[in-house]
Image (cartoon, rainbow, N blue to C red):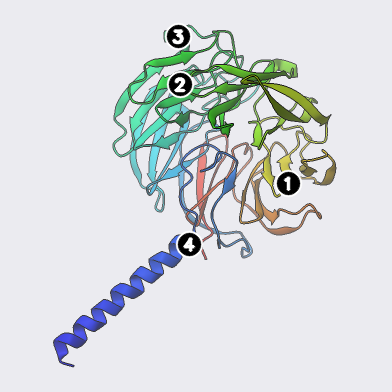
Amino acid sequence: MNKAAKGTSRNGLMVLMVFVVLLLCGSVYGGDWPWWRGPNHNGISQEKGWNASWPEGGPKVLWKASVGIGFSTFAVSGGAAYTMGNADDKDTVYCFDAATGKEIWKHTYNQRLDAKYYEGGTLASPMVAGGKVYTLSKDGKAFCLDAESGKVVWQKNLLGDLKIERTTWGLSGSPLVIDNLAIYNAGATGVALNKDDGSVVWQGPKSPGGYATAVPYTMDGRKCVALFGFGEVLGLDAATGEELWSHKWKTRYDVHAADPIIVGKQVFICSGYGEGCALLELESKDGKYEVKRLWRNKNMRNKMNASVLWDGYIYGVDEGGELRCLDLKTGELKWAQKGFGQGSLTIADGKLIVMGEKGNLVVAEASPGGYKEISSADVLAFKCWTVPVLANGRIYVRNTAGDVSCLDVAK
């Protein structure tokens, strides 16, 4: 074999090796987390093989940032990480390089802090879809921004333009994009805008709604959304806004902040202020659905952040500060672990990633057999009510003040 042929052979081998490495990396990491509650809207990451066992002191901090007061979590898509915060009565949408924390762009607009028995600031989280970023302020300012440049594609004030009444603590449900629609929990039964130009496609009554994000699901071949309203949980036809079912659910202060969990024709609902949780079952009847309650108790009370369903069991942080595990079928409490305050969690590869209110980040087994901690570290200062996000070997966390940390959990 001549030298040229040998060189070509070596180059080909190197290309093949690089391809194999990239292929393996693609199988190890689950990729992006482009919107609230992750790729499947259920709080579960598809990530595999990430490092759950940390050294003393916790995982390495890759980068930090300060984004302003608020509770918005991260959307991670296409190598960028998006979040929001408030400073000087202005909201800012930030776009960072997901790996380095370099600021790529930001978009700022007027929005009062509106602290009311808490620090105030941003509530909803960004959603990235089709090269656009969709955001919502607590006073109903909806933006569609170009994901690469931050340029405004369209904007609409849901409260001012559509005359929708504001909830006590402002709009907090994140945008949800389905087909050509951007759906918001604003008004009694939501509102849907054309995702490309912001025009109204359908709108429910203008009275106040709930605080949770609309959850997509498909039933009997129809695309639907489940929505927590002011005093009820309901199912809507996604394309038209037609109400398909509803179930009364009143909570003190009318706060329904935890998203419903849909599994088949069953719906798990939960709220705080002592209300508790329930499992509903939907039965088809003449194109509509009758709602049957299978059980109800107070074994889980999600005050702000929703629980996550994994292998038939519900994992969540109760308003009493305990991380809890419930049997979805019966509502039976399997175990409870103290020390998390008003915390939150996601699940990845059979493991709970729990962010405690005081900045304690914990990894534990998602098992009904008991609390089994794998790793823990104090990663932020009090107060932390925002859900941690795992994407591409990195965990993104923040506190109320807007201190952001990106943690390396790649193997």
What separation in Å lies between label 4 and label 2 (alpha carbons)?
43 Å
Which residue is labeled 3 in the image?
Answer: 162
What separation in Å lies between label 1 and label 2 (alpha carbons)?
44 Å
Amino acid found under the numbered disc labelled 1: Gly
**Crowding near the residue tagged with mark 4, few <14, some 14–19, many ≥20 C-alpha atoms within 10 Å:** few
Which residue is labeled 4 in the image?
Answer: 27
What separation in Å lies between label 3 and label 4 (alpha carbons)?
45 Å
Amino acid found under the numbered disc labelled 3: Leu
Which residue is labeled 1 in the image?
Answer: 312
Q: Quadrant of residue 13?
A: bottom left
Q: Say whether disc 1 or disc 2 marks the residue closer to the N-terminus.
A: 2
Q: Residue at x 74, y 17 (%)?
A: 250
Question: Residue 318 in the image: x percent, y percent?
Answer: 76, 36
What separation in Å lies between label 1 and label 3 (alpha carbons)?
41 Å
Q: Nearer the viewer, mark 1 or mark 2?
A: 1
Q: Say whether disc 1 or disc 4 marks the residue closer to the N-terminus.
A: 4
Residues at marks 4 and 2 touching, judged by CB atoms closer than 8 Å: no
**Of helix, strand and loop, which one carries label 1?**
loop
**Crowding near the residue tagged with mark 3, few <14, some 14–19, many ≥20 C-alpha atoms within 10 Å:** some
Amino acid found under the numbered disc labelled 2: Asp
What separation in Å lies between label 3 and label 2 (alpha carbons)?
23 Å
